[in-house]
Image (cartoon, helix red, strand yellow):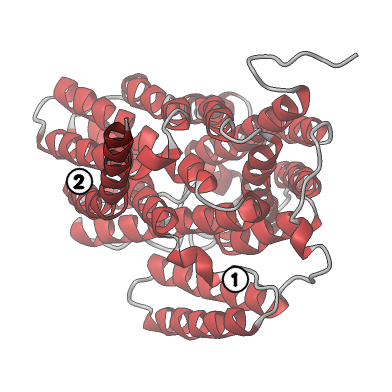
Amino acid sequence: MSVPPVNGLRPPVRWAQAALAVGAFCVQLDSFALNPALPVVRADLHGSPAVVPWVVSGYLLAAGALMPAAGRLADLYGRRRMLTLGAVLFGVSAALCALAPTLPFLVAARVAQGVGGALIMPAGLALLTNASPPGQGRRATGRALGLAGAATVCGPFLGGVLAQSASWRAVFWLTVPFAAATAWLARRADESRDASAAQSPLDVAGAWTATGALLCLARWLEHVGGWGWAVGAVLLGALFVRAERRAPAPLVDLALFRNLPYVTLTAAGAVANAATVALLYVLPLTLQQGRGWGALGAGVAFLAPAAALAVGGPVAGRVRPGAAVPVMASCLAGAGGALWVAGAATGPSALVVASTGAAVALGVAGGLALTGTQAVVRRERAGEASGVTKSVLTVTAGLGLALMGAGAGGGVGAGGLVGPDGAGDLVGRMAGGGVLPSLALPAVGCLLGAVLAAAVAVVTVVPGLRGAGRGRGRRRGRG
């Protein structure tokens, strides 16, 4: 006897949805909970100030650079298999982090954890996209991302409480059962892969050059004055393009970058993610440093914007693929205006209200970057597309915060990237009496992104509407 669907989804789809939701929650919880614990980590392990930032940067460099290769591995060798492998690696390395006797050991374990994180998101997104019936994947993915967004709300509180009342090691132990649950859920979903590439080996040249280019780019964003990293990124990027043009089964099909809706949603999502990361860290720090609030009060005030971000995924999942680019343009415009108001606010209440409004728009935009891009690419290469999108989101967040650091009178240091998709650790500069970071630059970035997305919407959507109108006119004429 067949099992009836629940909420319109068959059991294998629900297993895939649950696996993505728990996996993404696990990754985000680890990132947001760790940030408050970093000072305690340094004090307990007696590490050098130059090494402590690598607890964060080592993870992000591994995760961001490996996502394109991880996405294609999922397409080639099975999305369920790669999601399970990523969850197991993430959980085991989290346990090693919790047991770390020295700071270098902790950094090495965090790099391994980044490898696991690189597998979880692209493989999970592609697994759910291919498990869902046509037309239902967006909503299923949006709901999964919404559940995962709860980590944005509870992560910082849990990290701070555990670090102060128990141990920073408890922050890592916290993620182990979620990683185990992700692997257990993934094993109950249906396996899927790119059947057309079943006999094709992994494009090793493309994987090495893509990973190297992204590593160099990420390092340059952390040290904007180190132009050697920028040159390395450009050279390896050129070698990557050359390798992909020659490869019979490329790691990333360059035709993906001729898909205008995909490129637009990815680029606009990168802008939104950079602005989100800025907001996540500027708001509580501004309340504490600029308004004199305590950590608890700032944390409570942060709940409203964090919750607003979490609802963005389900809303984004209800947007039709044809409307994704116009909705993205509207979200960026609304976020840009709200961020501008938040930056100009003189009172804490106005700052929190404006930030919450910005978070609503940014949450939907961030969700669209994942649900919308999956809807406009071939399902067979969904892992490849999600890997490229997630990698772009991670790296460009570092760019936004590097620019913010420059605008505030200082650069973002070697450990400047924290958070699930890259964020900036501005605490050191602010505590040292530097200029408070401003939300003006993220606001301008969102407004410029809105203009570009709107231009693409006019080019791609309006002609389609006109064609549909002419078709209706001809039908009426025949009637």
Left or right of residue 151, residue 305 in this image:
left
Labelled disc at residue 211: 1
Indicate the position of residue 5 as horizontal and vertical percent values. Answer: 72, 16
Indicate the position of residue 34 as horizontal and vertical percent values. Answer: 54, 39
Residue under pointer 2: 443
- Give the residue displayed 68% in from the left and 22% down from the top: 9
Left or right of residue 426, residue 8 in this image:
right
Q: Is residue 427 visible?
A: yes
Count residues near mark 1 (Cα–Cα under 10 Å), then give few for <14, some for 14-19, many for 20+.
Answer: many
Work out whether 176 lies above or below 211.
above
Indicate the position of residue 172 as horizontal and vertical percent values. Answer: 67, 37
Residue 166 or 182: which is nearer the viewer? 182
Amino acid found under the numbered disc labelled 1: Thr
Left or right of residue 459, residue 383 in this image:
right
- Give the residue displayed 23% in from the left and 25% down from the top: 352
- Quarter containing the N terminus: top right
Count residues near mark 2 (Cα–Cα under 10 Å), then give few for <14, some for 14-19, many for 20+.
Answer: many
Q: Is residue 52 visible?
A: no
Work out how far the residue at label 2 is from the one at label 1, CA to CA, in angstroms. 31 Å
Q: Picture quarter containing residue 310?
A: top left
Residue 407 or 253: which is nearer the viewer? 253
Work out whether 465 lies above or below 146.
below
Residue 5 or 361: which is nearer the viewer? 5
- Give the residue displayed 58% in from the left and 23% down from the top: 165
Q: SS at mark 2? A: helix
Q: Residue furthest right?
A: 1
